[in-house]
Amino acid sequence: MSSIPDNLRYTEEHEYIQQTEDASVVVIGITDYAQGELGDIVYIELPDVGATFDRMEIFGTIEAVKAVSELFSPLAGEVVEVNAALSSDPSLINNDPYGDGWMIKMRLQSPDELEQALAASDYAQHIGE
Amino acid sequence: MHLKRPGPPGRLRVRKKKTGSQRIMTNTLNDLPPTDSFASRHIGPQSSDVKAMLKQLGYDSLDVLIDEVVPEDIRLRHPMNVPAAQSEEEVLNSLRQLANKNEVRRSYIGMGYYDCIVPPVILRNILENPGWYTAYTPYQPEIAQGRLEALLNFQTVVSDLTGLEIANASLLDEGTAAAEAVSMTRGLARKVTEPRFLVDTRCHPQTIDIVKTRADAQGIEIILSDPNDFAFDDSTVGILLQYPDTEGNIRDYTALCNRAHEANCLVTVATDLLSLTMLTPPGEWGADIAVGNAQRFGVPMGYGGPHAAFFATREKFKRSVPGRIIGVSKDAAGTQALRMALQTREQHIRREKATSNICTAQVLLAVISAMYACYHGPEGLRRIAVRVNTLSRLLAAGLETLGYKLRHNTFFDTLCIDTDPNTAARVHAAADKAKMNLREFTNGDIGVSIDETTTSDDVADLLGVFALQEQSPDVATLTASSANEIPSVFSRTTGFMEHPVFHKYRSETEMLRYLKRLEDRDLSLTSAMIPLGSCTMKLNATTEMIPVTWPEFGKLHPFAPPVQAAGYTELFRQLEEQLSEITGFDAISLQPNAGSQGEFSGLLAIRAYHHDRGDTQRTTCLIPQSAHGTNPASAVLAGMDVVVVKTDSRGNIDVDDLRAKADKHRDTLGALMVTYPSTHGVFESSIRDVCDIIHQHGGQVYMDGANMNAQVGLCRPGDIGADVCHLNLHKTFCIPHGGGGPGMGPIGVAKHLTPFLPDHPVIKIGHAKPFGTVSAAPWGSSSIMTISWAYLQLMGGDGLTDATRISILNANYIASRLRGEYELLYAGTNGLIAHECIIDTRPFKNSAGVSVEDMAKRLIDYGFHPPTISFPVAGTMMVEPTESESKEELDRFCNAMLAIREEIREIEEGRADKTNNVLTNAPHTLASVVADDWNRPYSRETAAFPTAATREHKIWPFVGRIDAAYGDRHLVCSCPPIEEYELEPVGGVV
């Protein structure tokens, strides 16, 4: 069983969305389930601060030893911070996907859209757990 | 069974007369069968074994079994019209006769191919050694450290000589390597919508044609001009140069590189490794990518191949490099270990998003070139280069004495002689008389390229030819002009190949032992079966291999006049005829140099056909989910849009989904790519319907011939409804895998596609409407086609068909023995499979925490190369025994698999630890089992000698389980630095 914290929102593409003190800014990463499926992550390509994405637009690429996957922006918005530590140590995503393994912080175009993302129970159902 | 077996070797089989007294022998010729008939040597199971295996399967005869496996409506019901089998001795004699029809002349043609001296210690111990040539691609690095080290040496040589940080190992030929550079450059400039690429007219002509063919399919405009006329704009993504260029000239590209970089363009240069021992490396004057052919590093020209091409670039582009890259990592014990790095770049993972479709490359040849470099070392290579350059300059001096004018004063090994047509014709006539080949430029200039084999006598002979009726100057009195010295601006100042590996093996004894040491680290067919699904690791018979290194096949330049290659021409014609008969097609093109190139060529033939009919919009390519990753990658390179077709729960194409998608895309449907038997190893009974549906909707059927070994003699792609099919000669037709190449991927086509087959800019093949050129040489890797030709003559029609039948029997036998203990996936409706079976190992993840990788590594402890893992279904194993494995070897494998099942059961039942057990710790190295501290909960004996057979012949993995992630996170792909060693001087030694 993978970890699916109740306080986060999710997408069917296995990204999670974590709210911050600033209601319009969220933290985005991939779920514990996703990191487990990928295996040892060796590389991640993330956007620059200031880049903007539509909902479901590709914002990056993640590579494991034998798998590669694109990262989809769960919501529309602008990147305000990127986790620079991942470029030198991508294993942070394996070891602590919801903590040190976070990927980007994004200022949402319309924070209400957050409601459309999956709740923990829905995501658990989606991955069959 | 139709195995015509003469009985044990050395014993004459005699037929007893039915009447009369006993022991009367008839001494007529008809009763004298040959004593070295080959089919029974190629096929593993003997008659009595076949009976026992059929019994295990519950069948009375092989015919009945085959009838149930292969659908009735596609069966070939007449014998193939191929020549009857010849004995091994007869085939060698026939090949000798063909070889004698080739005329080996001194070649001064150049153009990327140069005669060289293959050091005999390398010839015999690598090129002629099954320990090296029968190995597979190093996907199981624990039993491949030998060739991985050799390939790391190759990368280091290329990286050092080109002055670029990262090199791959390796590509197919210089032309396709240049085309890969164009694709990579385009991929890095994603935002440019209508990309243009500038190409120097003074690149080799075959390179230009290949680049044009590939770029055209990908919508990249190629603009050909002199570099002085290069115009950069926002759409220009890159430039291609040649250094030294095809006329031999060495030009200073520094300013041009600056202009290119200011315009955000990448610079690719096609170059020559030997010249780079003397010249400023491209990485130092601004090139971003260097490509070329490593042939002259110890590999025979072979009338076009095989040779290893190289590709080097800057560190920052490492994730975009095509082909395989060897990298340094560590094993479970922390020992340094090598494996293929950054595999996520490759088509088998990235599929339609891949920027290259290359898979099988030229490992064996890269190994040879690496060892040539090790044997000579930097100072030896420089000595060869200086010799070549000096002889070239002496020739230049002599030619100038004779009044000839050189087109360029700065050159390494190639002179371009500017002369009038009348003189040129007389010189070529004189050369012909002196049995030498010079290059004829299209503008009438004469080209002469000097190589490692050229002597001062040869230079004298050349001057004699150019002197015509005049007195030729005495070579001994000539002095090279200082005007022809390589100017200091081009003079290499940086060292290269400083690693100890390039300094240790100067004596033959040391070299011999180094080669043997590396060979012994690897598992090849000389030790055990390599049951890789979809790879067909069958016997590469000695008789088939012997002619490859005959000089009459090896020493021909690919652009020698065809009249000098009459033996090759005859061999190609017969091979084409016989492959046409086997596949049921109208024509064969022998040009594609690997399966990936065959796929690409087949799709381009289809594209050209559609274009010829005005159907330029037919670009949709349907590909089943279960297809190998190369299929979608090839389709995209051919300018097609991939639409995925579902497979049903039995692994077959979902015909309803296919029909719906064909209908939806009927206006744009270009092709279907289908593997047959399927990648799941099943003869799908719907295949005729599948082909019909595609044709009804205006598409063409591309059949992937990877599984042709299950079809030969039983059914034919052309009859089934395919329009084009590629053949992996290195699978079904016995070319050895060479540890990851060479391969050959000729294509067969139906009549309506024949006009579109590829041609060649230098040697015309003569197709009416060729789609372009796909290989640097007109017939790809000519010298290894002798292997497939020999196989066909040795087997004859009956033998070939028997091979197919036994390959199916062998696979079903394994399936039958394992069923019950293992779940098998995707049998046909009658529970039978084709020539390979898929073992479902996924349940053990939950039941015992054992992964398919654990099982694969444990098989190494049992002395086997693991089967294909995680293809076509993630988490499973696919086994293809081929016809060449005997019942005894199949039983040994099955027993190992069953024993491993017991080991898993011990974990399931709590009798073995869930994380510290024989599987999770596999493979076990010698060092680990003899170590002073052994704290595992099982015995050392269980670890290393699980069966009696392993006591008789133990294959030790050289390293333990490799940490692939570590290596990908810390990429090192040249020989790792060793702190303490003395550098030998590199400059100034000659």
Image (cartoon, grey):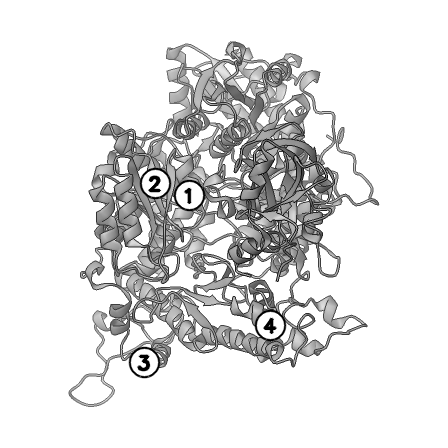
Q: What is the C-alpha distance between the residues marked 2 and 3? A: 42 Å
Nearer the observer, disc 4 or disc 3?
A: 4
Callout 2–callout 3 Cβ contact below 8 Å? no
Per the image, the residue denoted by label 1 is B632
Labels 3 and 1: the sequence-earlier one:
3
Identify the residue under disc 4: B848
Q: Picture quarter containing residue B962?
A: bottom right
Give the residue type at disc 3.
Gly
Which residue matches tag 2? B621
Above or below, A124 relative to B666: below
Q: Both on one chain, marks 2 and 4?
A: yes
The Cα–Cα distance between marks 4 and 3, rounded to whole angstroms, is 33 Å
Q: Which residue is mark 3?
A: B58
Q: Amino acid at mark 2?
A: Cys
Picture residue at 66% right of the left edge, 24% below the top = B279
Amino acid type, mark 1: Pro
